[in-house]
Amino acid sequence: MSPRRPARSLLLAAAVSLGLATLAGAEGARIALVVGNGNYQRIPALDNAVRDARDIADMLRGFGFTVQEAHDLDRPGFETFLRTALLNIPEGSELVFFYAGHGIQIGRRNYLLPTDVAFESVYDLPVQSVTLDRVVELLSARGASHVAMIDACRENPFPNLRLAANLDATLFETKSGFEVFSTPINSLVAFSTSPGQVAYDGEAGGNGPYTQAILASAGQYSDENILTMLADVRQRVYQSTSGRQVPWESSTLVQPFYLVQGGTAPAPAAPEAAISQPDRSAAPVQALAIDLTLPFARELPLGDRLAEQAGIPLGDVSVIEAPQHGQIDLAGGAVTYRPHLAETPMADRTDHILRDRFSLGIGGAGPGILNVSGGVPALACDVQAGDALDLQGVGLYRLPNQIEPRRALAACVQDVAENPGMARLLYQLGRAQQASGDLQSAHDSFRAAAAAGHIRARHAAAMLLLSPRLDRAVVPIPLDEAQGNALLDEAIASGDPFAMHSRGLRLLRNGPTEADRQRGFELLERAAELGHTYSMNELGAYFLDPDSRWFRPERGLTYLRASAERKDIYGYNNLGLVALRGYGKVKPDHAAARAWFERAAEGGHPFAPANLGRMIMRGQLGKPDPRAALRWYDIGLARGDGWGGANAADIILGGNARPLGPADAALRAAKALDLPTAEAASRAQTLLDGMAAADLDRATQMILNELGEAVAVDGRAGPVTIEALARAGSRAGLEALPADAGAQERLRMAARIWWAQNPPRVDLF
């Protein structure tokens, strides 16, 4: 993996909004993220926070930044904003993050407060706030140089409150002001006041002292290091507050950051005022309408296409009217369109198209205006197999259970052939292959995508190296913990939340030292802060485990409810288990458990069907109904749940599913043997040990028919059956059975072949 060129980034605490206009500059895009939170629902509102954000955003637009701005974000909104911002940041960008709003210190960490914050439990901190140092780390993964300026140290809205902030649930008092924290190399963190002190909001209808000082000072320091400007800001704030507020910074910058570049800074203005106009003095201006259709991508070079359709060289290009749904990059004399990307679910959709228009001024021998419009249709592979939280994708996504294997595979094979070497398409091809059951090809595609620089592909490749659910004799992918963990660590360093989750859960559950477990907890919380519901579920399950030293039911439920609020099927299933068993103050509620399990099962959860089957057979949903339970167990078995097979076999052998008989039970029990649930496999083996050889051979013949081998189901393993089993085994890459193999060995072989052809969805577990 080639080293990344250091990028610059500035984090200013005040406000953020999504306004995408023009990118320029030879060293890459200049991106500003601005958030202003003032309209709090349960704590005192801040009169000036949103105004501060808007004014800073306008100023930064005037300085040539593309601004992504948002106001009054609740916690889910903050998650979405961060994910969308990260999705749209080109690597190598110069970044600005500006936040204005409430913030508090708890322990040795600093937290930004969403507008819906409500600490009703001592365990609410991780789902009710945003951790400042994690925001810095997330942005550092997209670049290498950062400045953070935080205008958030108002009066503590939660005095005398103690909250749990660490794995060990130690309670810390909430405090006003912010604490010093370690920042990544090549970073600067600037606070509106000194550690532990309070910043002022200013007079209503104006700006806070800190924001006001930035607005007054920034434009006076063109082509000067940000540190020079901040010294002036500190002096202005000190004077305007009569010494009551003194801004403070901590820097590890090893290269300068320039807020204003290239001469005198313009006055803050709306984006349109900052867009240059073509020179019309030399010749009459000619207007030409151009219609383009280009495939959806993170960036689309336009120069050659525009020159071809205009019929003349473009010469100097300027932006007259900016795109509504993207941005124009004129860096290095090129003309590049970058569509604004947003996470967009594609389940049940077959296409996606973005339409946009903009106007360019062109120079040269025939100066004129190009009015450009057109559509940007998504590639079919992006629609069918794009992934969530993929920072190098195009925002279109399907969850693993939403991928339609055949359609996704056909789309991605074609798109990869037409766009060879495109890393995101190689990764998505791997997702389609995995959903189709071709795990070896999926692994090859993931590794090829990772080699081409795709971050998420490292995680996908690692999971195939680490998964206990693969029969390594059938799927020639090695079990390699060292290599798998190394790939996860590489992806974590690049900011991938899926890798944070997968590495974190292993360290939290199985870390050999307390430091390892603490790191696992931290990684899971980092992923959860981006809205990664898998991590919310893992943390919830961990604190609800009565065998864990950290058993805290109330704490676990906090995470699970947050997951379910985000419509996660694993959150649904986990809350079903809570309602079924009861935890702490939650009493058992079978009706609620059924509703949660059904929602999870409908979404593709692998274990929820068996949970429903058990409830039915226990009489927890009325009179036991074996046939209804069997239907649920069969769904679970097809998804890779061994208990689905063992329990279904039990029902059939009990005579409660006629006309199904012992062979049908044997078929299900055999399929359960090779699934990684030891207790279910043991129960299935016990059932098989009690069956007649003829029933086992009937089950073998039934499976062979499912595999496409036409054999009679007569319970006699004659030459036709033996030859069909050998052919199917050869296709699966398995060695032939010895001539004296018994009925159980034949059935076990048939079940292994079946799973080789229909492997369980390891991406669902």
Image: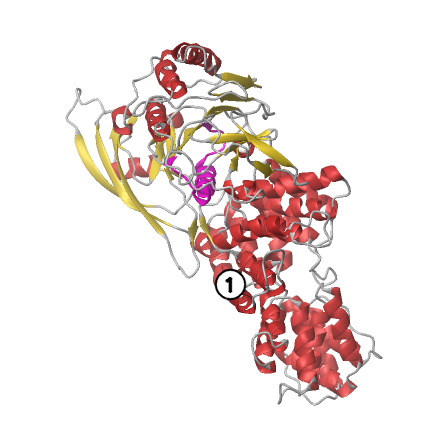
User: Quick check: can you spot residue 81?
Assistant: yes
Read off the residue under disc 1: 603
Q: Residue at x 55, y 35 (%)?
A: 161
Q: Secondary structure at mark 1?
A: loop
Q: Position of residue 399 (x, y in %)?
A: 51, 56
* Most distant residue in the right direction: 740
Query: Label 1 neighbourhood size at 10 Å, few (<14), some (14-19), many (20+)?
Result: some
- Is 87 covered by the magenta stretch? yes
Q: Position of residue 732 (x, y in %)?
A: 69, 67
Q: Position of residue 438 (x, y in %)?
A: 61, 61
Q: Quadrant of the N terminus?
A: top right
Residues shaded magenta = 70-97
- Amino acid bearing label 1: Gly
Q: Residue 73 or 255: which is nearer the viewer?
A: 73
- Is 738 covered by the magenta stretch? no
Q: Residue 247 or 318: which is nearer the viewer?
A: 247
Q: Residue at x 42, y 44 (%)?
A: 297
